[in-house]
Image (cartoon, rainbow, N blue to C red):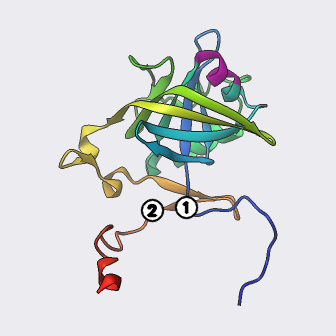
């Protein structure tokens, strides 16, 4: 039996995306955003939804670029801080001790210490309700070499974490359940 709990912003899993931008003065900023995901495979794109009130929103509009930084579990404290403070009032990189790196491809910084980075140029934006939906074409993916396995990022090495909107908590990614595009073959038999 299912019970209705009404319309809510709940989906599992919700990513922890740290969005890197520069403000109009060139100061690097980072924001925690859980509302986003891959939105196209050709060209490769990622989308995020932000409220106009955020400092990052204005930075993306001004610069036409952003990075999506995927933190490992080691940086849960810093990632949470990026979501509860504003770049209008604080230098988040100075406060956390993390290192902003200027992208050579887009006008946005990425975070050196984080294992997986998407460098994105803004290709589309649409307004809906309180949020703006930004779509960035992925110019490059950068992965720290120690997190690569046969040339691909390994989720078990990266140890990204997830956000639970219901309980305002972060969770670990679990163990592999099965191989995609093959376990379903058992149903086809």
In the rendered image, which quarter is residue 53 located in? top right
What residue range appears in magenta? Answer: 58-63
User: What is the crowding at mark 2: few (fewer than 14 residues within 10 Å), some, or many (at least 20)?
Assistant: some
Mark 1 residue element: loop
Q: Residue 105 at x, y = what percent? A: 40, 19
Given residues 151 and 167, the one toward you in this image is: 151
Q: Residue tagged by mark 2?
A: 173
Position of 78 relative to 123 (above/below): below
Q: Is residue 78 among what the camera can see?
A: no
Q: Residue 13 bears which disc, if any?
A: 1
Q: Which residue is drawn at 36% across and 50% down?
A: 158
Which quadrant is the C terminus positioned in?
A: bottom left
Q: Residue 100 bears which disc, if any?
A: none
In-image side of 79 versus 128 (left or right): left
Asked whether residue 61 is drawn in magenta, I would say: yes
Q: Is residue 145 among what the camera can see?
A: yes
Which quadrant is the N terminus positioned in?
A: bottom right
Asked whether residue 184 is drawn in magenta, I would say: no
Q: Which residue is drawn at 82% across and 69% down?
A: 6
């Amino acid at each position: 039996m299912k019970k209705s709990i009404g319309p809510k912003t709940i989906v599992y899993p919700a990513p922890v995306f740290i969005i890197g931008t520069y403000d109009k003065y060139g100061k690097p900023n980072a924001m925690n955003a859980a509302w986003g995901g891959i939105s196209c495979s050709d060209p490769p794109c990622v989308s995020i939804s932000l409220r106009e009130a955020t400092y990052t929103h204005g930075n993306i509009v001004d610069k036409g670029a952003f990075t999506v930084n995927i933190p490992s579990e080691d940086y849960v404290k810093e990632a949470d801080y990026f979501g509860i403070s504003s770049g209008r009032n604080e230098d988040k990189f100075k406060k956390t001790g993390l290192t902003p790196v200027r992208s050579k491809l887009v006008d946005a910084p990425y975070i050196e210490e984080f294992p997986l980075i998407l460098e994105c140029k803004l290709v589309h934006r649409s307004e809906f309700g309180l949020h703006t939906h930004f779509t960035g074409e992925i110019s490059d993916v950068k992965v720290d070499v120690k997190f690569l396995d046969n040339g691909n990022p390994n989720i078990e090495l990266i140890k990204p974490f997830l956000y639970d909107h219901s309980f305002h908590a972060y969770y670990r990614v679990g163990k592999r359940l099965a191989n995609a595009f093959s376990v379903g073959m058992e149903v086809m038999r």
